[in-house]
Image (cartoon, coloured by chain):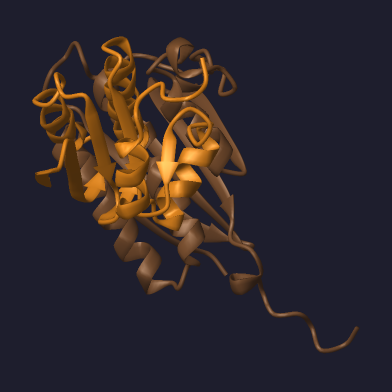
Amino acid sequence: MQIRDEKVGAVRVVAPVGRIDSNTSADLERGLRGHAGEEAILVDLLEVEYISSAGLSVLLKAASAARARRGRLVLCSLRQSVREVFALAGFTAIFTIEASRAEALDRLAEKPGGGSR
Amino acid sequence: MKECRTAVVPASAAGVGLAAEAFDAFASARRIPGEVVRSVQVALDEILSNTVRHGYGSQGEGGRIEIGFEIADGILEVTIQDDAPAFDPLAAPVPDTTSGLADRPAGGLGILLTRRLMDDVEYERASGRNRVILRKRMGGATAPPRPETP
């Protein structure tokens, strides 16, 4: 599958295109693993028309890996059909999901752990 | 009225893709509502991926999967059959979808999604074959017309 990959400021933006299913999820996994060391990762799903559990698993692993290194992973721009699958899997509660890329970049620009302590 | 179609695909990643194409062709020729199509696409992908991974995993290439699509009484039924060793995908433990990120196992999600997306999922082992049946009601859009008299 095609994956657009760019750096916006300090954020690595990974934008897969098309279907993330059992056939193509390995491509996304490779794409994300290449950036495993980065502090802020945004996965933009605007051009993803379909996601299966194989795709969800890849995102779950990437988010867990990011958290283990105290990095952050945010998702944005989920289409209705993709959002439905996230909701059914109970994934909307465990990921940080923003409506648009701009909002997601704002979120990632906030200082990590910047709240009251 | 009953409409059906059967496709036979190799038990491989490419075969899963072919099955998706066969379903898309079946669905678009019959004006199945988009929401039903998307749900069945996901469920079909989950069940077939499972079969390829678990069912034929030890035998390698050569296995075949037969998929039947049928519409009867406003219900879309998809039957998936293979000759692999007995494997009941519905017997897998279901993950707890309320647990946090750290506790979430990556497995078992496919079956969970399939159960939630479909109205009914059934497994049986008969005549040396695995058979999974997915059923999805098609809603008002494709229900048979009401009779004129109340």
Could you say where residue A47 lies in the image, as x and y percent from the top left?
25, 56
Measuring 38% from the left and 49% from the top, which residue is drawn there? B41
Chain drawn brown in the picture: B
Measuring 44% from the left and 20% from the top, which residue is drawn there? B108
Observer-nearest of B74 and A93: A93
- What is the residue that sits farthest to the right in this orientation? B150
Measuring 21% from the left and 46% from the top, which residue is drawn there? B17
The N terminus of chain A, quarter of image: top left
The answer to whether residue B133 is above or below residue B63 is: below
- Figure quadrant of residue A31: top left
Could you say where residue B14 lies in the image, as x and y percent from the top left?
14, 40
Observer-nearest of B150 and A116: A116
Judged left or right of residue A5, residue B76 is: right
Instruction: Determine the colour of chain A.
Output: orange
Could you say where residue A97 lies in the image, as x and y percent from the top left?
42, 41
The answer to whether residue B56 is above or below residue B133 is: above
Could you say where residue B19 lies in the image, as x and y percent from the top left?
27, 48
